[in-house]
Image (cartoon, helix red, strand yellow):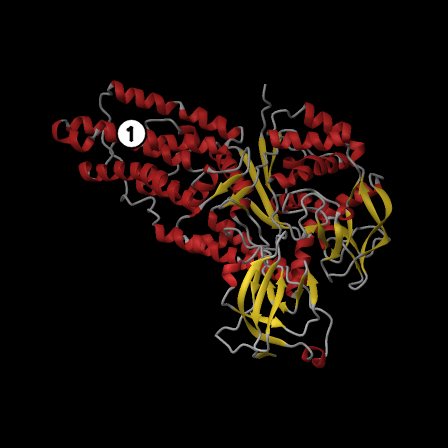
Amino acid sequence: MAKEFRRYLVTSALPYANGPVHIGHLAGVYIPSDIYTRYLRLKGCDVISVCGSDEHGVPITIKARREGVTPQEIVDRYHELIKRSFERLGMSFDIYSRTSSPTHAVTASEFFRKLYDEGKFIERTSMQFYDEEAQTFLADRYITGTCPRCGNDRAYGDQCEKCGSTLSPDELVDPRSAVSGAVPVKRETKHWYLPLDRYEEFLREWILDGHKEWRANVYGQCKSWLDGGLQPRAVSRDLDWGIPVPVEGAEGKVLYVWFDAPIGYISATKDLTPDWEKYWKSEDTKMVHFIGKDNIVFHCIVFPAMLKAHGGYILPENVPANEFLNLEGEKISTSRNWAVWLHEYLDEFPGKEDVLRYVLCASAPEAKDNDFTWKDFQARNNNELVAVLGNFVNRALVLTQKYYGGEVPECGALTDYDRATIGELSQIKGALENAIENYKFREALKEAMNFARIGNKYLADTEPWKVVKSDPERVKTILNIALQITANTAVAIEPFMPFSAARILGMLAAEPFGWERLGSMEMLAAGHRIGEPALLFEKIEDEVIDRQLAKLAATKELNARAEAEKNVEKQKDTVQFDDFGRMDIRVATVLAAEKVAKTKKLLKLTVDTGIDRREIVSGIAEHYAPEELVGRQVLVLVNLAPRTLKGIESRGMILMAEDADGKLRLLQPDAAAMNGAVVG
């Protein structure tokens, strides 16, 4: 039998304050969190929802270094941007805090100090990477190199963003400092570790035996970590940005962000209410963490071990982590600007907050990675929100205005079809509640939309615009039922689309009904006067979507250029002008070209250099067919020492350039020039 809870604590993963929020964050964490919280509030539950900016991560210090500003300037900028964006989207956090707050500094320090005083940490001296040029120890994210799993040459010391592998700096091939670019060395340093291995038996029993209902991706990842054997994990770092380790001899060390950040949920609750302890320390409270799959280990292994070590705190009842959302078939990447940023969307699609909320819930990556495309966004808006939900509400209200001057008509005798429709509607509430309470928000959204789908079908089948001529009394019943369905729809969609729910209530001229009345066919009394109907949603035209696709195409082109520039060879050693002057480069015309027998790469070219006619062997057969070259002018280094290749004396070198994709390109004059013209 499921345990009954008196109150709920909902936490949402703290976004790093080093950049804006994008649709991947929304689909993975924040839309599901808000749906769940709004649902509980509608039911009259005692629930608080906490979130805030994570302001002590290494990515923040990296961004500050790149921009030449302080970390505080970075977090101040993005905290306000993220907070305002969430407000504009309708996120209903009770508090959006930040880990740079005084309350958090005290809470995190006291948490660490209690564990330290009770001997819950172990101290270790180890060899860690150090940047001699910058004179600083390097946190994992400050070390880059080649991933040993996939060969990505821009992997971080803690993770490869290309293949998703969790790494350690020692695993990287050719590690480099992200601060100076120098090759780091190893130096001795001391840190404090939380011995997770001591809590392995507790975690195994709590998760593997006690929470088999968790999502397969969460349960499976936890089992993998536990089966692999837990190791002590550092809770401090050598950094100058963060909460100082509150013990003697810890100068220049701060709390590791993954020790610091989850305590932010506690400090946010403290800032919200003096009764914070009843949400964190009472067994009558149900705590639910909403996170993305990359945070599973921290919220299911590390943080619970911290809470257990501290004592007195409850543990999460569920951690419904989503998978990743891709964009147009590619992984969302903040570094490559391959994302749909929330603040930009809100500026470019004013009044369409609920469209984004709807689409991201309908395509949420609950069981596997999913893909957001602008064409699907358009189709869902036009075919579902406009054609189903908006169309039904508009027809019900417009017909009521037209036939009854905006007054809700009396409900008369019911037909078998009326009763069948009402019976179908009565089943939605239970299915909707079951889906939300089991964190199946895509399924829940379908159930909420079923009110509008059934309402649309009901009007289409009963055709009140035709029946009104022959049986006006029957139309009163039809429109009464349609209006009751409309009121139900406003309640059902509120957790998913709060702005649209409020607009429907406004058009009905009704106060919020409350979740307990969902399913009732007596929500609007006969004689109640509704407000003025208006379109709930607008069709999104092709040109709007084309602009977004063009924006992404431009981003892709910029990324391709940046990638090509990264592959450009480093400048060679400096030469004097006299050295260059000894090179005799001439314009020449290719007179003949043929493949060199028994080779794949070599062509024999006969060229007119203006000085003479000569043969040159060039390794370009995989890039140019012989017939493509005849008659073309090229640049030739004519005073290169002769070399015999495959029995052919090659007297010179054709000048080429190599693209990022390895394609060789001829260097040519941009207009016809005299053979023998000197290049210099």
- What residue would you read off at disc 1? 457
Q: Position of residue 535 (x, y in %)?
A: 30, 45
Left or right side of 419 for 363: right
Relative to the observer, which residue lies in front, 530 or 497? Answer: 497
Q: Compared to 245, does 561 lie above or below?
A: below
Residue drawn at x 47%, y 46% as measured from the top left: 90
Relative to the observer, which residue lies in front, 228 or 440? Answer: 228
Tell which residue pokes out farthest to the left in this image.
Answer: 470
Q: Amino acid at mark 1?
A: Lys
Q: Is residue 458 in sight in this rendering?
A: yes
Q: Position of residue 561 (x, y in %)?
A: 56, 60
Q: Which quadrant of the structure image shows residue 651?
A: bottom right
Relative to the observer, which residue lies in front, 45 or 676? Answer: 676
Mark 1 burial class by Cα count in 10 Å: few <14, some 14-19, many 20+: some
Q: Which quadrant of the structure image shows residue 182?
A: bottom right
Residue drawn at x 38%, y 53% as measured from the top left: 544
Tell which residue pokes out farthest to the front in this image.
Answer: 647
Q: Compared to 101, does 112 lie above or below?
A: above
Left or right side of 364 for 289: right
Left or right side of 138 for 634: left
Q: Position of residue 299 (x, y in %)?
A: 67, 38
Q: Position of residue 487 (x, y in %)?
A: 34, 34
